[in-house]
Image: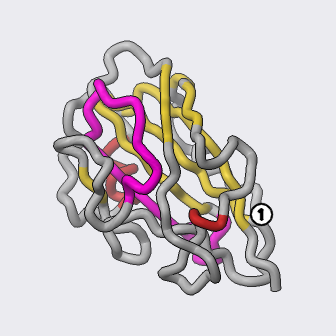
Amino acid sequence: MSSNDPFARLPEAAAFTVVSTTVTDGGAWPIEQYSGLSGVPGGKDVSPQLSWSGAPDGTRSYAVTVYDPDAPTGSGFWHWAVTDIPATVTELPEGAGDETGPGLPEGAFQLPNDARAARFIGAAPPAGHGPHRYFTVVHALDVDTIGVPADATPAALGFTMAGHVLGRAVLTATAETLA
């Protein structure tokens, strides 16, 4: 794992809480959250269940992202990005991030990840590369809709959100593929 802090250069934001029945903060992803699409045996590309609470006053919508800063790309790897989640929603069920987005609330949509699929793609660190961190972040935003097109990248979403983030709830999981 690198010491790369994906929040080091972002504006500070209030902290709130995100929990999951799928994985505990600091724990390892279960095999279902690994990438079968990338050929990891047993991987199913199932997005985690997430519940959040304590968002700052003024929150009008949320975005959820999953990011691996330890991927050997020079820019990390975006596994999932969902935006325009209404402020009244405080949970996504496990599996909400498949290609049809069955558990996403009305108005919310998934952006293409770094594999260019508008869905959750699970962990697939290169064999022998060591453990990777996966930052699952719920971003509390001060707008109803962030205004990015459906084909925007997660990085473009992050850039557009930067001036609208009121708070961040962070859950970090790990994954490793042994050599």
Would residue 44 be visible to someone looking at this image?
yes
163 vs 43, left or right, is: left
Would residue 74 be visible to someone looking at this image?
no
5 vs 101, left or right, is: right
Q: Is residue 167 above or below residue 45?
A: above
Q: Is residue 177 above or below residue 33?
A: below
Q: Is residue 54 above or below residue 168?
A: above
Q: Residue at x 53, y 83 (%)?
A: 38
Dot 1 surroundings within 10 Å: few (below 14), some, or many (20 or more)? Answer: some
Residue closest to the far top = 57
Q: Is residue 20 above or below residue 4?
A: above
Is 95 within the magenta?
yes
Q: Quadrant of residue 55?
A: top left
Q: Position of residue 41 (x, y in %)?
A: 64, 82
- The residue nearer to you, when weighing 126 against 45, is 45
How many numbered circles does the render carry?
A: 1
Q: Secondary structure at mark 1?
A: loop
- The residue nearer to you, when weighing 129 against 85, is 85
Is 53 within the magenta?
no
Name the amino acid, label 1. Answer: Met
Q: Residue at x 74, y 83 (%)?
A: 127
- The residue nearer to you, when weighing 122 against 43, is 43
Q: Position of residue 1 (x, y in %)?
A: 77, 63
The quadrant the C terminus occupies is bottom right
19 vs 88, left or right, is: right
Q: Quadrant of residue 21?
A: top right
Give the extent of the magenta segment: 70-97
Q: Position of residue 105 (x, y in %)?
A: 25, 41
Q: Residue at x 65, y 67 (%)?
A: 31
116 vs 171, left or right, is: left
Write down the residue under mark 1: 1
Q: Residue at x 75, y 70 (%)?
A: 176
